[in-house]
Amino acid sequence: MESPITVLWGNIVHTFENVDDASLKMHQEATESGNLSNAIAYDNRKEKVRTPYADIHTREINLQETYLSHLWAFIYSVFVMYEEGIQKPLINNTFDGSLKFETPLLKRAKLLFDWSISLTNSYSEWNEKLPNPRTYNSNKEKFYAEKVNGIFQYAVAYIMFHEFAHLTLRHDSFFLGVDMNNMDESEIAERVQVENEADQYAFNMLIKDQNDEKQKWLKGLSILLATCSALLITSTAQGIKQSSHPDLDQRMLNVLQGLNLATKEAQFYCWYLCSFSIRFYLIKHNIDVPAGKYETEQDAFFSYLDLLDEIKSNNGI
């Protein structure tokens, strides 16, 4: 059965090619020079999640249907749980620190979240009775799904521009003939720097100085949710520590600091969202979620980073 995510394929490609006024010409120049294939490799095999990658030989960016399905479902479920279960109670002064699944909207979002995470272990079909980009159970779900479509398309564009950077910034030498198991410290540091460069390139393709606060928040949220997804698809708790990439929590922090949002409301939303995602990561790996009150959303986030540092050193489990 064809995944519901296929209805967004044209939107995915269009957003990637037209993220700003100059990007289409940039894509054309990259294909004409031979740095980038004029095709995107789309893998629709029924397999568990595999993250996107650049093929140095074919010059294609490879996207897996299962991964795209995971990402949309993850973004939808986290966005709805955060909006309905945290933001609204905070505004109404009824939030007591716990997420309560008391409405059909929240219960169904949690079921979709669980399915999105299960795809990292084994493939299963998308139950279209749950939220998806093709069919809607209610006007409220349609409202959120349409918002998520836009966030999702920018999130995929960010991921694709990371791979685009590898193909166009002369990163080939860091991928061809490298034995990942026998790199010395200097080679690892160089590889991490290359990944940081690709992250920054992708960030700069989406976030522009001329963006107003709303545009910066929307695109920044897209990048953060893609980063949060990477955290949640780790197979073990120690997966947050990467061997040849920046650690996943550091990548999240880099985005938060790079956004430099102007309003307190936008800052709170993004910093607290990341703390919320880390809580789900801890729950997934059966790690006690710390209780405590914090003066600011940044204090809460950095307290979680301290715990993640313990986990990375294998002392926090």
Image (cartoon, grey):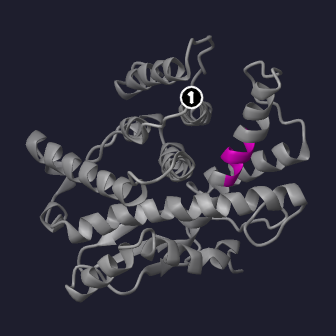
What residue appears at the point 52 percent right and 61 percent down from the top-left corner?
A: 154
Amino acid on which disc 1 is placed: Lys
Which of the 4 image quarters holds residue 252? top left
Q: State the image coordinates of residue 274 (x, y, percent, origin top left).
A: 54, 35
Tell me where the magenta segment starts and ends, as one range. Answer: 76-81
Quadrant that contains the N terminus: bottom right
Does residue 224 show up? yes
Instruction: From the viewer's side, name the closer residue of 142 and 210.
Output: 210
Q: Is residue 295 magenta?
A: no
How many numbered marks, from 0 up?
1
Along the line of sight, the residue nearer the viewer: 175 or 97: 97
Side of 144 where 70 appears, left or right: left
Question: Which type of secondary structure does the marked residue at label 1 adopt?
Answer: helix
Residue 77 included in the magenta stretch of the image? yes
Residue 8 location (% of width, % of height): 63, 75
Task: Provide residue 97's location: percent of width, then percent of height.
Answer: 72, 20
Q: Is residue 248 left or right of residue 103?
A: left
User: Which residue position is annotated with label 1?
Assistant: 264
* Residue 269 vertical placement versus 106 (above, below): above
Q: Residues within 10 Å of mark 1 (few under 14, many from 20)?
A: few
Looking at the image, residue 169 sits to the left or right of residue 290; the answer is left
Magenta segment, prevailing SS (helix, strand or loop): helix
